Amino acid sequence: MTLRVGYIVGSISSTSINRALARALERLAPAAGIELVEIPIAGLPFYTSDFDADYPAEAVAFKQAIADVDGVVIVTPEYNRSVPGVLKNALDVASRPWGQNSFAGKPTAVIGTSVGQIGTAVAQQHLRSILSFLASPELSQPEAYIWSKPGLITAEGEVTDEATAQFLTDWLTAAAAHIQRYSA
Ligand code: FNR
């Protein structure tokens, strides 16, 4: 059976290079034997504990979308050496109400691209720390820090460099094996 894997893009920019990377992963997913479906975060309200008594519909749908997939790929930018606020908010929404943490036991794999040469390495370490607290089994290796050079990945998700396409396919294959192991 084909694994159904959700993905979250941690940027709501209309020109997001991380969305382009996510599109590239979508294109490469069949080669890794998985189906990738987006779990959108742009419409989520800012989390407050006021939600807990009566969770907003968008947040309930978001948590259900996570429940419905075998694992989650998170494609994160690096903003000021951490994850963007929109992504942290989405993780906070998913983590509550207390006792209903959507990431508990849900396998995840993190990847990201930035215009900086370290390719979101610092943001990914922060993200791993959050996911660790949320009790999500994370793919530890291979790591994937993608340095975004002009034209490397088109807005439509075409990867113009063969070695990068192969690296991303291998990374997805490792992510799929990790998710398979924990979703069983
Ligand atoms: C950045 N950028 C950035 N890059 C990086 O490598 N390390 C960083 O700490 C930051 N910090 C940062 C803060 C803010 C507020 C912005 C807007 C940008 C540059 C970043 O890599 C670039 O804008 C990417 O295009 C962001 O990814 P998305 O949103 O296009 O997917």
Image (cartoon, helix red, strand yellow):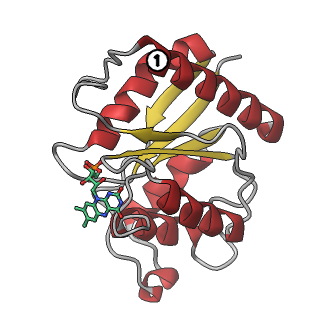
In the rendered image of this protein, does residue 49 appear above or below residue 101?
Answer: below
Q: Is residue 23 left or right of residue 52?
A: left
In the rendered image of this protein, does residue 21 appear above or below residue 121?
Answer: above
Amino acid at dot 1:
Ala
Q: Quadrant of ligand 1?
A: bottom left
Q: Quadrant of the N terminus?
A: top right
Please name whichever residue, 111 or 98, is drawn nearer the observer in this view of the structure.
111
Residue 69, horizontal then vertical, whole percent: 60, 39
Q: Measuring 41% from the left and 70% from the top, which residue is drawn there?
A: 89
Residue 36, horizontal then vertical, whole percent: 50, 28
Q: Measuring 50% from the left and 72% from the top, which residue is drawn there?
A: 92
Residue 101 visible: no
Instruction: Say which residue label 1 marks.
Output: 165
Residue 154, horizontal then vertical, whole percent: 24, 24
Q: Measuring 74% from the left and 64% from the top, which residue is drawn there?
A: 135
In the rendered image of this protein, does residue 59 appear above or below residue 159?
Answer: below
Q: Residue furthest left?
A: 14
Residue 80, horizontal then vertical, whole percent: 35, 70
Disc 1, ligand 1: is the CB inside 8 Å? no
Q: Quadrant of the C terminus?
A: top right
Please name whichever residue, 44 or 152, is drawn nearer the observer in this view of the structure.
152
Residue 180, by quadrant, is top right
Residue 162, by quadrant, is top left
Residue 68 visible: yes
Q: Is residue 14 left or right of residue 130?
A: left
